[in-house]
Amino acid sequence: MDLSVLFFMSSGLFLGWSLGSNDAANVFGTAVGTRMIKFSTAALICTIFVILGAVISGAGAAHTLSKLGDINALGGAFVAAFAAAAVVAWLTVLGLPVSTTQAIVGSIIGWNFFTGMSTDFSVFKTIIGTWFISPVLTAFFSYFMYKGVSWWLNKQKIHLISLDALTRYALIIAGVLGSYSLGANNIANVMGVFIGANPFQDLGPISGLQILFFVGGIAISVGIYTYGKGVMMTVGDSIAPLTPVGAVVVVLATSLVLFLFASEDLEFILASLGLPTIPLVPVSSSQAVVGGVIGIALIKNSGNIRWKVTGRIVVAWIQTPIVSALVSFVMLFLVQNVFAITVFQKVEFQVSRPLLEKHAQKLDVKSLESLIGKTYTTSGALKSDVDKILPHADYKAELTFVQEARMERITVDPARFPELGKSGLLTQPQIDSVKALSGKTFDYRWQLVEALAATSETWRMKEKTVLNKPYNKQVGERLAIVMDLYTERMK
Amino acid sequence: MSTAHFSLFGRTKALENKIDEFLDVLSECNIHFKAAITYFLEAGGNTASAFQQKVKEVSAMESRGDDLRRHIESELYEQALIPDFRGDVLSLLEDLDTVINLFEDNLINFSIENPQYPTELHKDLKGLCEQVALSVESCVMATRAFFRDINAVRDHAHKVMLYEKEADKLSIALKTAIFKTNLGLDQKAHLRNFVDKIDELANEAEDVCDLLAIYTIKRAA
């Protein structure tokens, strides 16, 4: 086992710790804040189900791509994960609920700036959208749900003690489901980047990946136990006083908002039934839960809302990606120049005629012909040259062009064919079509994708519609398996 | 399925039953008290076996009430139930227990001190006991409503206020009547003391309902 991998993994574990200490509040904050569930009970339930979620569902898809996967060197991933973790940890100590994902996105932007890679700035639009949309939508839902639940409870005349028991069970069930999905959805952020360098071997029926995710799950659990209470109390008690029924409504409203506005599964079901779909919008549970609490406080007594605390939380949301980017940038500089650790692998970007032809529909490629033959070491440098030639080019189209200009020179090595079937996800026709390309070399990644699509229709993406989304996603995941096999892994 | 349901909510239902039983004890003490005073007056003193029987019954109920209250309180604390209303429910139970104690105290005092009310005052004393009983019964109903139907608390609590006022009027009238008799001052003071003690039951019921009104506002908020 390479000991350096374990060292690099430590920052992933730190990120897991931060995630546990901060994001457990999204699940159990209101329950613990209203004293309906003891912190020790909440921490135990959360621990068990976070680990189960991480190991069972997190590792279910063989290639859970991490956002940190954009970073191409283990040293860089180490720093980016550390920067995000440090920022989330700092805000956790202050008891403020923030989005760990946004901290990670911020630290990747820091890496992009440091390495001169181009950044898709539309991610900021998404993040800023989340700051507004998540709390407002959840506040709206919790407001009306609470009114409905209060009316129903008035009619039912449930005994105070029975109501207490019902509320407690509802909070526990919601907590179990929330913890499971916390583990399943976030383990990739914590450990995904180390999949390529996983030091763990398969142990009987348990895969090395599951062991890796189990270790990540433990890190999340330690975070919950050691520092989870502070943020939970902020969410469940400090923003505004909350009743136990209110605590349940907040959790339900948060889950409902995530389900209605962020679930591709629901979108697919609605589309298959011929019903209009609900537009998917960026939502974050950390921000949604705060909106949920405020929504209920608006019904009860808006004077009870502690705007000072709310203001601090909002400032923390804004700080999260920005400070993460700054910390990441400064740390990358130090790690590279003081400790001489590689934080990014040299890559090449080249414009060629096939690339121009591929983008002929969306870009004025004739003007870009002057770039043919030039080699760039960063996508940022290429983008800046494209900007000079085409100052008014479509932003997304230009970004895709720049990203696809990356030279990878992928050779389909027949020696690795036996590994194709290992995941169990590729179909025989898919494996056969990879084999048909034996020995061929492709300059760009997209050329290999196109070649595969030309060989077999099982590799072809369908038209971009809601109904085709799951199919295309599946093809994408299987393509990632082939790419991981033939492109260089993170070092 | 039914077994799972039973065990899941079994402890909760048992606790609810204990609270109901505690309120039943208070309600029954109320009925026995009224009957005991009637037996006492009809027999002309503490010698009536029916009266002594009632004293024993109320004493036993007081002990049962104490046990139930302690059990409910420890269950609420041990299981950390109703965190937002635990304090309110505990003080509510303590206050209602005070009412039960007052019933017992009154009857024991009647039994020991054997106050001799002139026959012409019997009707007024029974009238006072009747008003006190009505106020305590409304207080019990208000408390039951607090646990199950908070919208009904106000209706019952309002009745307690009315009955308490009526009890006050009757007790003043009775005390005035006592002091107009030809009895000695020591005897007059003795009888007045019992009237005050009985009226205290209605006052206590009113105090409980005042607090209940606040707890209800808190619960409905």
Image (cartoon, rainbow, N blue to C red):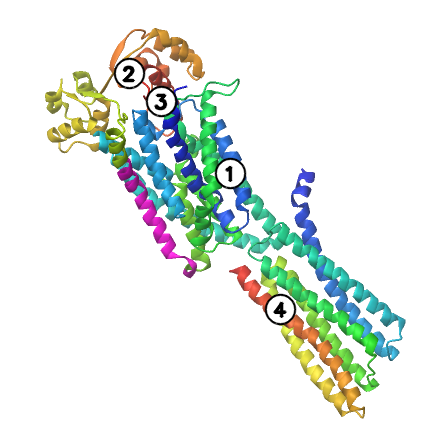
* Residue nearer the viewer, A360 or A82: A82
Q: Mark 1, mark 2: which one is toward the viewer?
A: 1
Amino acid under label 2? Answer: Glu
The answer for how far apart the CA atoms under marks 3 and 1 are is 32 Å
Classify residue B73 as left or right of residue A179.
right
Q: Report the residue marked by disc 1.
A: A46
Q: Magenta residues, as a range?
A: A303-328
Taking the spot 44% from the left edge, 53% from the top edge, the residue there is A238
Q: Are marks 2 and 4 in contact (CB under 8 Å)?
A: no
Taking the spot 39% from the left edge, 30% from the top edge, the residue there is A10
User: Of the numbered discs in the image, which one, if any, rests on residue A103?
Assistant: none
Q: Report the residue marked by disc 2.
A: A450
Q: Chain of mark 3?
A: A
Q: Report the residue marked by disc 4.
A: B209
Question: Please, what secondary structure does the residue beneath circle 4 have?
Answer: helix
Q: Is residue A146 above or below residue A410?
A: below
Classify residue A321 as left or right of residue B18.
left
The answer for how far apart the CA atoms under marks 3 and 2 are is 13 Å
Rendering coords of residue B72 (x, y %): 68, 55
- Identify the mark nearer the N-term, 1 or 2: 1
Q: Report the residue marked by disc 3.
A: A476
Q: Are marks 1 and 2 in contact (CB under 8 Å)?
A: no
Q: Marks 1 and 2: same chain?
A: yes
- Identify the mark nearer the N-term, 3 or 2: 2
The answer for how far apart the CA atoms under marks 2 and 4 are is 80 Å
Q: Main secondary structure of the magenta part?
A: helix
Q: Mark 2, mark 4: which one is toward the viewer?
A: 4
Classify residue A451 as left or right of residue A301.
left
Q: Chain of mark 2?
A: A
Whether residue B74 is in magenta: the answer is no
